């Protein structure tokens, strides 16, 4: 299997994931080892809608959205590892978050940060995938978790 050309931009990501603004939390894929590992990024801007209320005067990206960004990167790893991913006629699968284990947050993510998500596929279990996820900013880990996602085919 040939890996897609990198980097993979947001237009290609939108063909693979069902998420859209304001909930698409991956801007680019910068590294990919199909069926093994992906590195993706999210540019965190002051214009993010969640900063309005989290927190006024001290904007911090909610940890649950950092986890969601890592889960979306995991979904991209699975989709980009599929052999028929480039077909325009392919209806993409959807991945639903099933379980989050060992979540840790070690630093706040703020406007101006570039969130780098590194996701490794630990194992596939029937229609589910277990990922080891790490998020970092400026080379320092800000969050980590083990994430289990289930795949369902789109209607």
Image: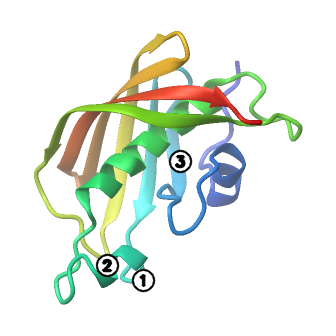
Q: Label 3: how many residues lie within 10 Å, few (<14), some (14-19) or many (20+)?
A: many
Query: In the picture provided, is 2 more to the left or to the right than 71?
Result: right
Of tags 2 and 3, the one toward the viewer is 2
Q: Position of residue 8 (x, y in %)?
A: 62, 49
State the residue position of label 1: 47
- Mark 3–mark 1 Cα distance, whole angstroms, equals 22 Å
What is the secondary structure assignment of the residue under circle 3?
A: strand
The answer to which quarter of the image holds residue 16 is top right
Check the picture and name the quadrant holding the C terminus: top right
- Mark 2–mark 3 Cα distance, whole angstroms, equals 24 Å
Taking the spot 32% from the left edge, 47% from the top edge, the residue there is 67
Numbered mark located on residue 51 in the image: 2
Numbered mark located on residue 125 in the image: none
The answer to which quarter of the image holds residue 148 is top left
State the residue position of label 3: 29
Query: In the picture provided, is 28 more to the left or to the right than 139?
Result: right
- Mark 2–mark 1 Cα distance, whole angstroms, equals 8 Å
Point out the residue furthest to the front here.
155
Taking the spot 50% from the left edge, 47% from the top edge, the residue there is 30
């Amino acid at each position: 299997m040939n890996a897609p050309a990198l980097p993979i931009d947001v237009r290609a990501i939108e063909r693979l994931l069902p998420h859209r603004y304001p909930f698409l939390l991956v801007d680019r894929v910068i590294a990919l080892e199909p069926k093994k590992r992906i590195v993706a990024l999210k540019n965190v801007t002051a214009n993010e809608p969640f900063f309005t209320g989290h927190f006024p005067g001290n904007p911090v990206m909610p940890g649950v959205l950092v986890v969601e960004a890592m889960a979306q990167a995991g979904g991209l790893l699975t989709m980009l590892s599929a052999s028929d991913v480039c077909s325009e006629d392919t209806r993409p699968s959807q991945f639903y978050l099933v379980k989050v284990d060992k979540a840790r947050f070690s630093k706040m993510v703020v406007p101006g940060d570039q969130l780098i998500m590194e996701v490794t596929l630990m194992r596939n279990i029937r229609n589910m995938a277990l990922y080891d996820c790490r998020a970092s900013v400026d080379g320092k880990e800000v969050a980590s978790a083990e994430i289990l996602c289930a795949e369902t085919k789109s209607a």
